[in-house]
Image (cartoon, helix red, strand yellow):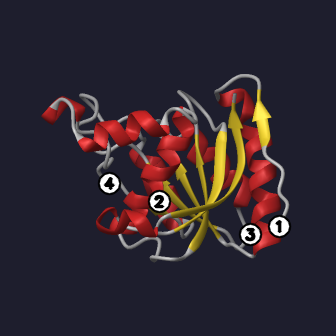
Amino acid sequence: MESTITYFENSGQENTEAVFDLVDKALQEEGIAKVVLASTRGGTARYAMDRYKGRDVRLIILPHQYGTSPEQRFPAALVERAREEGHAVHFGTMPFAMRKVFGFSIGTAVADFLRVFCQGFKVCIELVLIAGDAGLVAVGEKVVVVAGTGWGADTAMVATGATTCNLKDLHVSRILCKPL
């Protein structure tokens, strides 16, 4: 199999539309109907919900878990809208985000290693695990995963579902795009 990876000169929201163009192509080519995405403040979720409205694509939206900031930044009204449209919103714990609790840990080392590829790559891996732990993505289920750096989307991949207990089952079969 031959596949192309798109590299963005810069990270961040300026790449969001191009990322979802690549996501659309992967959904069609691979017969996938589920997109797992990060959305801290709701912008990426809102963009994806508008883009896929009326299409047979289910979004698994994963904002930061409660306690990451003093107040939850993902709008409650957007949670309601997403669920009404048949999408899932889950505020799951980020498996590698234990630096504040334990200082250095294996999870911190894994997160730092994944950031070598880019911030979004690390987040995509976390998203698959969070969705798997929540039962929103089955172990072995192929999904498209979208994340970014700061705001918007700049990284996407095709991966198979796994849980934190079975991290070795997670498989990235295709990197669609990432910032340099």
Tell me if mark 3 has few (under 14), some (14-19) or many (20+) residues whose alpha carbon lies within 10 angstroms of its own: few
**Image quarter in which the N terminus is found:** bottom right
The label nearer to you, 4 versus 3, is: 4
Label 2: how many Cα within 10 Å (few below 14, some 14–19, many 20+): many
| Residue that carries the numbered disc 1 in the rendered image | 1
In the image, residue 130 sits, relative to residue 70, either above or below, namely below
Q: Which residue is mark 4?
A: 92
Q: Nearer the viewer, mark 2 or mark 1?
A: 1
Q: State the residue at coordinates (80%, 41%).
A: 6
Q: Amino acid at mark 1?
A: Met
Q: Secondary structure at mark 2?
A: helix
Q: CA distance from mark 2 to mark 1?
A: 23 Å
Q: Residue at x 29, y 67 (%)?
A: 165
Q: Is residue 98 above or below residue 126?
A: above
Distance from Cα at disc 1 to Cα at disc 4: 34 Å
Residue at the spot of label 3: 55
> Dot 4: within a 10 Å radius of its alpha carbon, few (fewer than 14), some, or many (20 or more) residues?
some
Quadrant showing the C terminus: top right
Q: Which of the two discs, 2 and 3, labels the residue nearer the N terminus?
A: 3
Q: Amino acid at mark 4?
A: Gly
Q: Please name the residue that numbered disc 2 is placed on.
A: 128
Q: Amino acid at mark 2?
A: Val
Q: Are marks 2 and 3 in contact (CB under 8 Å)?
A: no
Front: mark 2 or 3: 2
The amino acid marked with disc number 3 is: Arg
- Residue 108: where, in percent of width, then height? 30, 37
Determine the image quadrant of residue 64: top left
**Circles 2, 1 touching at the beta carbon (< 8 Å):** no
- The alpha-carbon separation of the residues under discs 2 and 3 comes to 22 Å
